[in-house]
Amino acid sequence: MRNFCKRLPNSQNLTAPNNPHLRIDIKSLAMKTFTKTRLSSLIISLGLLATSTGAFAHGHESSKPQLGFETQLVSGNVYMLSGVGGFTGGNIGLTIGDDGVAMIDNGLPSVLELLKAEVAKSTDKPIDYLINTHVHGDHIGNNEAYGSGKTHVISHQNLRKTLLEKGISTGGGKSKPAPKDHLPVLTFSDQMTIHINEDDANIKHFAAAHTDGDAVVHFKKANVIHTGDILFNQRFPFIDTNNGGSYQGVINALQSIHDMSDEDTKIIPGHGPLATKADVATTIEMLKGARNLVQKLVDDGMSDEDIIAANPLKPYAEFSWGFIDANRMTKQVLEGLR
Ligand SMILES: [Zn+2]
């Protein structure tokens, strides 16, 4: 039960695109010995059976959450917005106060109006600063929409460079040039700080982690850190080696985030529920442990194919989710060993 509860993901993740394992995943969950009530409440909360079991869905359709966001006050004047009822992109951070509003990441383009509506529940002020944690479209999909107004888009210099060189992915390996308003107007190399709402929001770069342009935002007074996708809380991470990310780089960055934190620090991960310093430690242990398990099989002379088939990450099954299952994670570990 512990494992099951721990792997209870945000609904955003279970309905993520590229999620061919979703149905299988749910079936395997259903085979476990939970009480009917618990399983039912899980399924309702995930809004999943509505399409697969008509009778069930009919009786509970009103319980299915609409696609949108929920806002939670994290600490001080910092909020976390996360998706409900489907995949809206990565977790979003927000500081609201007398000086104005800064937002960290901004979700998929398709959820722009939902995002605006959610932010409007907390403030009627415009967004002054839009901080990008990294280049992925589920985190900066609405740069252009905000950047065409008076919002200043901020990122690490490599993120802007990637957008200029590679454009915006449109799927299937294709891309389009990034419009001017989509591009950050303020970039930094190592770190910068926004002094806003009686806090110091330090934006720090970590090299070659999730990508080569990662930024972590640390609200010093509120004691809140937004990690971007350096932290996938309670699940296997995606490491974008095509955009300069690296397995060891993620471990290094997580170790730094761990060292920046104390027992009270609230950590907004790129995906997954709000995290603590202990969650970061757990993720580091998993990444190192997974690597050790795979390394042993490499040392035994096994081929990549045989290693993947052997499912060496079984001890970390609770980290498996729709987008990165144990199979895909094993491939990432192998890549990290090269
Ligand atoms: Zn990402």
Image (cartoon, helix red, strand yellow):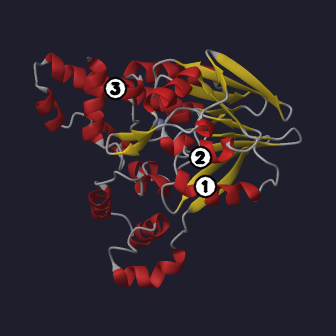
Q: Which residue is mark 2?
A: 142
Q: Quadrant of residue 133?
A: top right
Taking the image as shown, residue 181 lies to the left or right of residue 43, namely right
Query: 281 or 76, which lies in front?
Result: 76
Q: Amino acid at mark 3?
A: Gly
Taking the image as shown, residue 199 lies to the left or right of residue 80, namely right
**Label 1, label 3: how many angstroms apart (C-alpha)?**
39 Å
Mark 2 neighbour class, 10 Å CA radius: few under 14, some 14 to 19, many 20 or more: many
Q: Position of residue 265 (x, y in %)?
A: 67, 32
**Local SS, label 1:** helix
What label sits on residue 112 in the rendered view? Answer: 1
Mark 3 neighbour class, 10 Å CA radius: few under 14, some 14 to 19, many 20 or more: some
Q: Quadrant of residue 202?
A: top right
**Label 2, label 3: how many angstroms apart (C-alpha)?**
37 Å
Q: Amino acid at mark 2?
A: Asn
| Badge 2 or badge 1: first in the primary sequence | 1
Q: Residue at x 58, y 21 (%)?
A: 157
Q: Position of residue 25 (x, y in %)?
A: 30, 56
Check if mark 2's residue and mark 1's residue have beta carbons within 8 Å.
yes
Q: Residue at x 36, y 74 (%)?
A: 51
Q: Which residue is mark 3?
A: 289
Q: Position of residue 331 (x, y in %)?
A: 25, 32
